[in-house]
């Protein structure tokens, strides 16, 4: 009578031999695939927390997406998937007639996620609850001049608390490595560093803004230059920036944690 354990072992050995033969025949293809896996691992697993699903999602965002979206006034959110962000960013990169559709994606995304963003920010920055709640309340009641100002100033002061510098600082944008070292190495650091470039529309000063400039700009808003930012679009964009900056700056907190 055949020993079932030995039969299983023999079958497993034959399967391994076949697999090993296939591996030997396809080494180049496997190597390329594994390189792709490694890239994905760096981007997707680096900052995953045990119970933070939003960390998993944000870990899959490519840093270059930040600039693609920020050029049009939007910022990635940890509440959406890599595929959703890829589609969104690609829509901005397509023909000009696709731009409005790409903006519509942003409108619907942040209209839908506003309650969750508010809950997360209030939980993360409890000492700012009254100001953050007022910002979202102003947005809900279409007091967009107020909500835009509050979202932009809170993003700035959250950064001031964590990094000791304004997120709109020209010096920090020119020398991002000086603050980048405060981050734990990983995707959150890369996303933050991706934001630090001279063409970032939100921080362009009067000298660097082209005559056709029409994006949300913190100089124009907070220095009183602009009076036409009281729109739902500007408020959603300011909300998306507050949401993004607060999330990304978690990378500083984790870098400073004691193992």
Image (cartoon, rainbow, N blue to C red):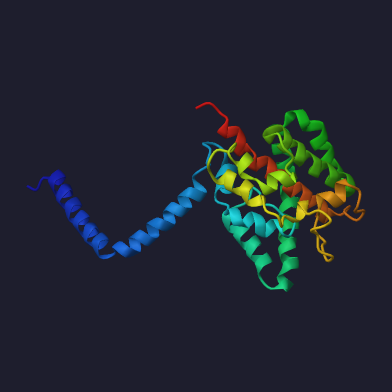
Asked if residue 142 shows in the view, the reply is no
Q: Tell which residue pokes out farthest to the left in this image.
A: 1
**Where residue 48 sits in the image (x, y, percent)?**
52, 41
Q: What is the quadrant of residue 37 in the picture?
A: bottom left
Total marks shown come to: 0
Q: Is residue 57 above or below residue 258?
A: below
Q: In the drawing, does residue 224 fall left or right of residue 165?
A: right
Q: In the drawing, does residue 20 fall left or right of residue 76?
A: left
**Where residue 224 sits in the image (x, y, percent)?**
91, 48
Pick the residue in front: 78 or 175: 175
**Where residue 109 sits in the image (x, y, percent)?**
71, 54
Q: Is residue 191 above or below residue 22?
A: above
Q: What is the quadrant of residue 255 in the picture?
A: top right
Determine the residue positioned at 68% across, 58% down: 69
Q: In the drawing, does residue 224 fall left or right of residue 60?
A: right
Determine the residue positioned at 24% across, 58% down: 19
Determine the residue positioned at 57% across, 33% down: 254
**Where residue 7 sits in the image (x, y, percent)?**
14, 49
Determine the residue positioned at 65% across, 46% down: 175
Pick the residue in front: 174 or 111: 174
Pick the residue in front: 247 or 130: 247
Q: What is the quadrant of residue 25 in the picture?
A: bottom left
Asked if residue 132 shows in the view, the reply is yes
């Amino acid at each position: 009578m055949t020993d079932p354990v030995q039969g299983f072992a023999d079958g497993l050995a034959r399967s391994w031999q076949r697999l090993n033969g296939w591996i030997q025949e396809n080494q180049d293809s496997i190597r390329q695939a594994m390189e792709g896996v490694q890239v994905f691992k760096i981007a997707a697993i680096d900052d995953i927390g045990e119970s933070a699903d939003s960390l998993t999602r944000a870990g899959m965002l490519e840093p270059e997406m930040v600039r693609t979206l920020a050029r049009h006034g939007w910022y990635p959110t940890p509440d959406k998937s890599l595929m959703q962000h890829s589609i969104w960013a690609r829509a901005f990169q397509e023909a000009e007639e696709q731009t409005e559709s790409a903006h519509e994606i942003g409108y619907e995304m942040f209209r839908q996620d506003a309650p969750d963003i508010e809950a997360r920010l209030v939980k993360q920055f409890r000492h700012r609850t009254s100001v953050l709640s007022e910002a979202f309340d102003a947005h809900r009641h279409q007091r967009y001049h107020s909500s835009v100002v509050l979202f932009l100033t809170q993003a700035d002061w959250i950064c001031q608390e964590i990094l000791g510098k304004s997120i709109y600082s020209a010096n920090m944008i020119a020398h991002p490595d000086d603050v980048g070292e405060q981050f734990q190495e990983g995707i959150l650091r890369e996303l933050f560093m991706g934001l630090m470039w001279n063409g970032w529309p939100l921080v362009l000063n009067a000298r660097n803004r082209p005559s056709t400039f029409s994006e949300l700009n913190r100089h124009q808003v907070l220095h009183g230059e602009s009076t036409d930012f009281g729109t739902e679009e500007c408020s959603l964009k300011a909300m998306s920036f507050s949401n993004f900056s607060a999330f990304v700056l978690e990378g500083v907190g984790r870098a400073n944690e004691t193992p």
